Image (spheres, grey):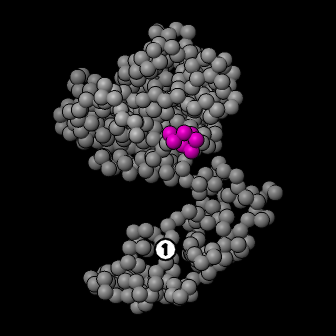
Amino acid sequence: MEVTPISKLQPISSNILDAVGNTPMVRLPAGFDPEVKCEVLLKLEFMNPSGSIKDRIALHMVRQAEKSGKLKKGGRIVECSSGNTGAGLAMVAAALGYDITVVIPDKMSSEKIAAIRGWGADVVVTPANVGIEDRMHYTKVAGRIAAETEGAWWPDQYHNPDNTDAHYQFTATEIFAQCDGKIDHFVAGAGTGGTISGIGRYLKEHAPNCKVVGVDPVGSVLAHYWKTRELIEGGSYAVEGVGEEEVPRAWDVSVIDDYLVVNDQDSFLMARKLARATGIFAGGSSGFNLAATLRYARNLPADARVVTVLPDYGKAYLSKVYNDDYLRDNNYLDGVSANSATIGDLCSIKNTATLSANDTVTWGIRQAGERQVRPLPVIENDILLGIFDEGKAIQLLTTGTDTTSMLVRECYIDAPIVLDVAQPWQDATAALNNHDSVLVKDGNSYSSLSRNDLLRSLTRLNHKN
């Protein structure tokens, strides 16, 4: 194993906030995209302490607000976020002793929301399917909470110049130094606009021949506005942390030389390819940036150098970008013909388990409750006896009965309908008309299929062929 030279080791930090920044830059391996001949460099911003580039603006905005007196000791931070700024601010708030409320739309990954709560933040989840002027839009909710809360400070990252300044002062100077001043093209998406604007402004001053290229998801308004200065109505998209439905004041259109548009599917599949081909486990917006960067780089000469940022970490998207079921349910992976689909094509990846009649009821409660294996098969000598009786288990827990010495043979009921994984998918929908869930047999193993599963997985079927 190679040992890091002592000269490259970071000194001991006094707190977690001192670890923000100084992220590595990695060269994309040659041949990752056979059509790209030039050098592509990746700034690994997901290696910031909370897992994203937004740690930079969170810390800088807080420090500037403290200096100006907008945020005072004992105050509360209130911010609207697609998740990463909320996480960064929650980390900063925990380190500095501030209370914080984060308002986040419900389309964001469950991992992000759970992480923000883990830092002790109060989280308010708002509907994602409302317009920018709706009172329930997450920006409006955050502003209202801040106005109604004594001692609250609203960073308002979309329109805060300190957002852009953080990247001008810190992110850009790191990139420039790591590249020894040689950078021909910089490609990045914009949500608040702070990243591309701050870095772009710095590069225009210090590497004036560098081309700055913006990236927008399909459905965002920014690319169209950059090209025409016309504000159109936005649409929906799934990639998180980029794109907008309004024009943020943190976004400086004057530093951008070109704009590309990338769809959700290309973003997610590129992130997965990056993880499997290089070991770099980055989030959906990282795949989004890289997909655009490679498309742009295919037209560049071999001696060009292109830099992009990978904004956040893949672990924040285990339920989405790295979940085959999510991708299949939303048609980002190939669907299956309704003419030939089986029950197995509707089944999702989930925890599985079986009980024996001699297992304890306590063990059954753990499998059904904590691991969510429901219905939970009870098997003896490869024969299905039935399923764990959740109703009886709940009664036992309600009365405080000791279940550690009770056996499952005293706590099971007849199994619901059992279907084979190879049966036509219509058999499952017919069975679930009258049952909440069924068991699906695949060889010697069992899994469950519920009405809730169908609400998601039926979208995988292609009825056109």
Seen at 59% across and 78% down, the residue is 444
- Side (left or right) of 229 relative to 76: right
Seen at 35% across and 32% down, the residue is 4
Dot 1 amino acid type: Ala
Q: Nearer the viewer, residue 10 or 431?
A: 10
- Side (left or right) of 113 relative to 119: right
At which x and y percent is residue 186?
A: 54, 21
At which x and y percent is residue 98?
A: 23, 39
Residue 273 in view, yes or no: yes
Does residue 275 belong to the magenta stretch? yes
Determine the secondary structure under disc 1: loop
Segment tinted magenta in the rendering: 274-280
Q: Nearer the viewer, residue 401 or 431?
A: 401
Which part of the image, by quadrant, shows the C terminus?
bottom right
Q: Is residue 153 above or below residue 354?
A: above
Q: Residues within 10 Å of mark 1 (few under 14, many from 20)?
A: some
Q: Is residue 116 above or below residue 201?
A: below
Residue at numbered disc 1: 353
